[in-house]
Each structure stands twice: as C-alpha cells, then as structure tokens.
Amino acid sequence: MRKWKIVFGIAAFFFAMQLIRLPFRSHLDITDFLLLILSGFSLFPLYGYSYQITVGSKPIAVAIFSINTFIAVASLVIVGSLVILGGLGAMYVLPFLVAGLIQGVFLYPQFLYAFKSDELWAKNA
C-alpha cells in the first residue's frame, strides 16, 4: 500500500497547489471551481484505498470513479483525435501518452476502491 500512499500524496500536493493558486489567478471561471471541487472529491477514494479505510459509501466511490473515468476518456479522445487528424503536431504524441499513463495511475486505485474492496466495505459498513 505504500505506493498508493505516494500516489495519494502526489495528488494531494497538486490539489493543494491548485487551491493556493486559485486566488492569484487573473481570470477566474466557474470551471476553475468545478475542477477544484472534482479533484478534491477525487482524493477521497485515493485516501480510502491507500490507507484501507472507508470514506463515504460504495455508491459514492463508484460515482467518483465513473465521473473521473468519463472525463479522462473524453479528454484523451479529444486530444487523441486532434493528434491523429493533424490539428496538433507530432510533438504532442509523447505528452499525450504520458497524460494517458498518469490518468491510468490516478484511476486504478479508484477502481480498486470502488469495485475490488468488498471486504473493506463489508468490514466497515
């Protein structure tokens, strides 16, 4: 579980940086707040899985995973189609692949927490 604690720590660090940087932005939009709230809620399953405790309920964990998966797949499809169709240059292929890998590392513990931690949910229900 140590590797998932490191993943949680990195995600919490980036969330804290977003939170600190928010008041100093020159142009604020409602999407800035929505993304901040979504990334904050995404920390709950990461924390729960890395420390093997229940945070919230299983339907909430499934909902958070589903929303994050939808956003990750949609962003990868949009950027991937721009790369394939030639709207973005070939220099974007490597960052595209790295972004997909990072999203996979971020989503995997959320998947395990939502769908593969039945003993955790049964024990602490």
Image: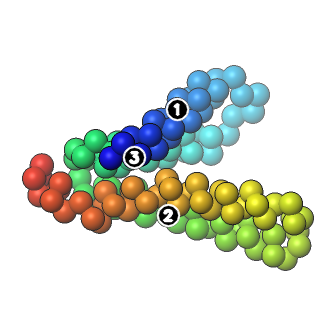
Is mark 2 in CB contact (under 8 Å) with mark 3? no
59 lies above or below 1: below
Q: Which amino acid does label 2 sit on?
A: Thr
Residue under the image location 23 percent in, 53 percent down: 57
In the image: residue 8, left or right of residue 62: right
Q: For marks 1 and 3, give the CA distance.
A: 14 Å
Which one is in front, 106 or 61?
106
> Would you name the residue on which mark 3 appears?
4
Residue under the image location 76 percent in, 61 percent down: 94
> Would you name the residue on which mark 1 appears?
13
> Would you name the residue on which mark 2 appears?
69
> Which label's residue is closer to the chain start, 2 or 1?
1
Q: Which amino acid does label 1 sit on?
A: Phe
Residue under the image location 67 percent in, 57 percent down: 98
* Residue 28 screen position, x and y as percent: 69, 34
* Residue 117 screen position, x and y as percent: 24, 60
Where disc 3 sits, the SS reads helix
